[in-house]
Structures are given as structure tokens and as C-alpha cells.
Amino acid sequence: MSLLLRSILQGLGWELGKTAAKEAVEAARPETDAEKKAREKAEAKARREAEKRAAAEAKRRAKEAKQREREVDRELAALKKRMRD
């Protein structure tokens, strides 16, 4: 049993080491023009989507603020009407 467990752990260590080495080589390798262009395109798309979400959120907040303002104005008008009556 001990030999089996040791073999499994060695295999796992080998796989982890191999994966780490591949990632290190990939990170050290210079980026090609196609990869750079694809990365920049993805970053630009993510930036545009974030700007869209921010604009939609600002629009939603403005709409909610306007609705609250109208509600306050209605309540104020109702209070003024009660004061006059």
C-alpha cells in the first residue's frame, strides 16, 4: 500500500512540475504579433463592455433619483394642500 501511495504522489508531483514548467516557458516566451493583437482586442472589448455597464448603471441611478424626486414633490404638494384646507 505504501509503495502504491508513494508512486501516486510521485506521479502527481511529476504532473505538477511539468505543468509549472510549461507555464514558465509560456510566460518567458515573447508574445507574437497575432497574440498581442488578440490580447489587445480582448482588452478593448472588455473595456467597452465595462463602459456600457457603467453607463447603464448611471442611467438607472438617474432614473431612480428622478422617481424619488417626483415622489417627494407629490408628498410635498399633498402636505401643502392639507395645510390650505
Image (cartoon, rainbow, N blue to C red):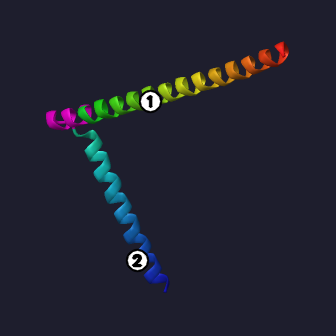
Looking at the image, tell me whether mark 1 or mark 2 is earlier in sequence order.
Answer: 2
Closer to the camera, 6 or 40?
40
Amino acid on which disc 2 is placed: Ser
The residue that mark 1 highlights is: 56
Task: Say which residue appears at 59% left-offset and 23% top-offset.
Answer: 65
Task: Say which residue appears at 49% left-offset and 86% top-offset.
Answer: 1
**In magenta stretch: residue 31:** yes
Give the number of the mark in front: 1 or 2.
Answer: 1
The residue that mark 2 highlights is: 7
Instruction: Please provide percent x and percent y for residue 57.
Output: 49, 30
Count up the numbered dots: 2
Q: Callout 2 environment at 10 Å: few (<14), some (14 to 19), or many (20+)? A: few
Instruction: Please provide percent x and percent y for residue 37.
Output: 19, 32
The span shown in magenta is 30-40
Where disc 2 sits, the SS reads helix
> Which residue sits furthest front?
85
Residue 54 vertical position relative to residue 1 in the rendered view, above or below: above
Instruction: Please provide percent x and percent y for residue 76.
Output: 74, 18
Where disc 1 sits, the SS reads helix
What is the quadrant of residue 67 in the picture? top right
What is the quadrant of residue 8 in the picture? bottom left
Q: Callout 1 environment at 10 Å: few (<14), some (14 to 19), or many (20+)? A: few
Amino acid on which disc 1 is placed: Ala
Closer to the camera, 10 or 48?
48
What is the quadrant of residue 44 in the picture? top left
Q: Is residue 71 left or right of residue 46?
A: right
**In magenta stretch: residue 37:** yes
